[in-house]
Image: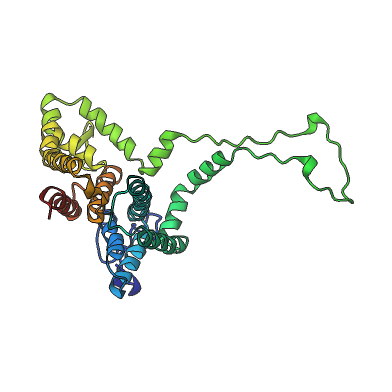
Amino acid sequence: MFIATVTGTYFRSYNEYLYGLGTVGWFFAANEIGSIIAILTPFTIINIIDNKLNIVNIISIILCILSSLYMGTKVPFLGFVGSVGILMVYIIFTSIFTRIKKIPTLLNYKKISLCVIIIGMVFCSLFYKSPVYKNLMFNYGHIINKIVKFIEGPQEENPATKPMDPNEEVVVVEPEEQEPEPEINMHINQDDLVGSLLSNRTAIAEEIKNIYKNSSIVEKLVGLGHVIEIKPGISTDKTIEMDQLDIFYRHGIVGTILYFGQLIILMVVIIKSLFRNARYLLDLDVITCMISIFLGIAIAFSSGHVLTAPAVSIFIILSIIKLYNKVVEGN
């Protein structure tokens, strides 16, 4: 992505007819490459914390930050913010817990905190000049302003506290001559907020849900398929882009069980092992895998193109295998 961008040979993250800045390098699908970057971000951050500070690790974290910001899409951006945020919460919680319980640990909390803070500062310093900032302000600026106004509340200026110019002429205005100030609507509609954040995927999901509810028993069991008749004579293969819902509606109850059965069994085994040996929660490799898996599943539900895309899901599989080997097999 970096080489393609600096040489000007990159593909745009958005089509020409859509507003949106950003680059996907020489890759094809912005959604998929953005999800891959988000899933791999925790490993990049932990790599620079765990290992010695050398030129390779510094370059890797800089490229990770640039990729997250200059793609212009919100998935890698939120993946980076989420990774840093979760890691910071984890550091604070485990630091307090180990001190209270007097549990010995190999974690160097000062070094980890310093690395995370520096990474966060570099990220924030580049954020306001990046394509993702401009895209977020264009798409969600009105919502952000409304939230800020809602938090601040109505602000009224007290005329008595305003300094008066000695040369200013005092004009007495009769009450009936005063025009009422326009009322600012600071109400935040939850449906509009969720719909905007999910790019109106909820509206498509509601439409597909109604079709599924009115479908036959066979379709409920094995799914509606990938081409769905939304109106008489009108069919579409457009997905909701919320993987869990797409899998359920497209493959039905049977398909969903087959799709997620193995994943659920593996996660149950891993969670049981963590309960038996909670010390694994003080292992940064374990936490990294858990953050990566969490981000992957969250992105799958909010943006799609993760569980249903082999190029992306392979990275979640690798994280699960690494976590399983570490926690269950002990290697």
Q: Nearer the viewer, residue 34 or 29?
A: 34
The structure residue drawn at horizontal position 27% and vertical position 63%, both measured from the top left corner, is 50
Percent position (x, y) of residue 151? 55, 40
Percent position (x, y) of residue 137? 47, 52
Q: Is residue 241 left or right of residue 176?
A: left
Q: Is residue 8 above or below residue 246?
A: below
Q: Quadrant of residue 67?
A: bottom left
Q: Nearer the viewer, residue 215 or 321?
A: 321
User: Where, quadrant-wise, is the N terminus in this rendering?
Assistant: bottom left
Q: Is residue 305 visible?
A: no
The structure residue drawn at horizontal position 83% and vertical position 48%, both measured from the top left corner, is 164
Q: Is residue 106 visible?
A: yes
Q: Nearer the viewer, residue 94 or 200?
A: 94
Q: Is residue 76 above or below residue 258?
A: below
Percent position (x, y) of residue 47? 27, 63
Q: Is residue 57 left or right of residue 188?
A: left
Q: Is residue 36 left or right of residue 22?
A: left
| Colour convention | rainbow
Q: Residue furthest front?
A: 102
Q: Quadrant of residue 37?
A: bottom left
Percent position (x, y) of residue 91? 35, 52
User: Where, quadrant-wise, is the C terminus in this rendering?
Assistant: bottom left
The structure residue drawn at horizontal position 23% and vertical position 56%, both measured from the top left corner, is 285
Count how many numbered circles sit on residues in the image: 0
